[in-house]
Amino acid sequence: MLYDCRALADRDRGIAAAIEAVRNGELVVLPTDTVYGVGADAFTPYAVKALADAKGGSRQAPPVLIGSRHTLDGLVFSLPRAARDLVEAFWPGALTIVVEHSPSLSWDLGDAGGTVAVRMPLHPVALEVLRETGPMAVASANKIGQPAAVTAEEAREQLGYAIRAYLEAGPAVDPVPSTIVDLTGEAPRLVRQGAIPLAKLRDVVPDLLDSRGA
């Protein structure tokens, strides 16, 4: 079902429905500050598999979205100083960081080699859902090979009945993908150019390598 979160009553119903769906292991589509995402409870393996199946089948590990900076400490064994500085500067926002997750976590996100890509989005609807559900595995709300959805309606046209609740908040304001920085190596490295430019990142972490390792 699609809920128009631009109307207060529908927003409240939609957010409640999305929270319930995630807790039940179902999929939801929600707005973020980049493109719309399709999400599932990160700790429910069959829900994460359903997410991959809905997109067309992939073992590529989806990013994990969180609703609070403090949640990050529960996901990682040790957080590098550079990661803390970047999070302080750019979260919530369009920055995804790749870190080593705690080996004690009981999740199966796919073929990620002990790492996880984490982001805290700057969108009130997403944050309201995430603060109740906890960490969610979230990928772009589209079939593999199709354009990323910039509205929930576009997502519904691609994903159909695989999704329990669609949260519509209007067209994505800035549908540029998040910037991704890998913090698992000896030096921080830019993995994907995105909404936050390299120069701004280097203002915070001067030794950040670009995607070519320079």
Image (tube, rainbow, N blue to C red):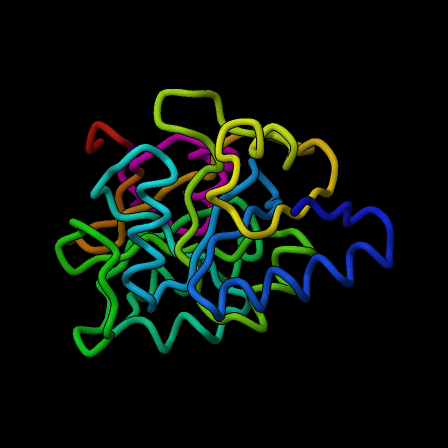
User: Is residue 127 depicted above or below 140 in this figure?
Assistant: below
Q: Is residue 178 above or below residue 40?
A: above
Q: Which of 84 and 155 lies nearest the eye of the viewer?
A: 155
Identified at 61% across, 43% down, the residue is 33
Q: Residue at (47%, 68%) from the top-left corner?
A: 24
In the picture, measured across the screen, residue 64 lies left or right of residue 175, that is left
At 86% from the left edge and 50% from the top edge, which residue is drawn? Answer: 7
Residue lying at the far right in this picture: please name it. 8
Q: Nearer the viewer, residue 96 or 24?
A: 24
- Magenta segment: 191-210
Residue 166 position, x and y percent, is 62, 46
Asked if residue 207 lies in the magenta stretch, the reply is: yes
Q: Residue furthest front?
A: 161
- Taking the magenta stretch, the answer to whether it contains residue 129 is no
At horizontal 26% and vertical 42% (from top left) the residue drawn is 189
Q: How many marks?
A: 0
Based on the displayed image, in which of its 4 quarters is residue 104 positioned? bottom left
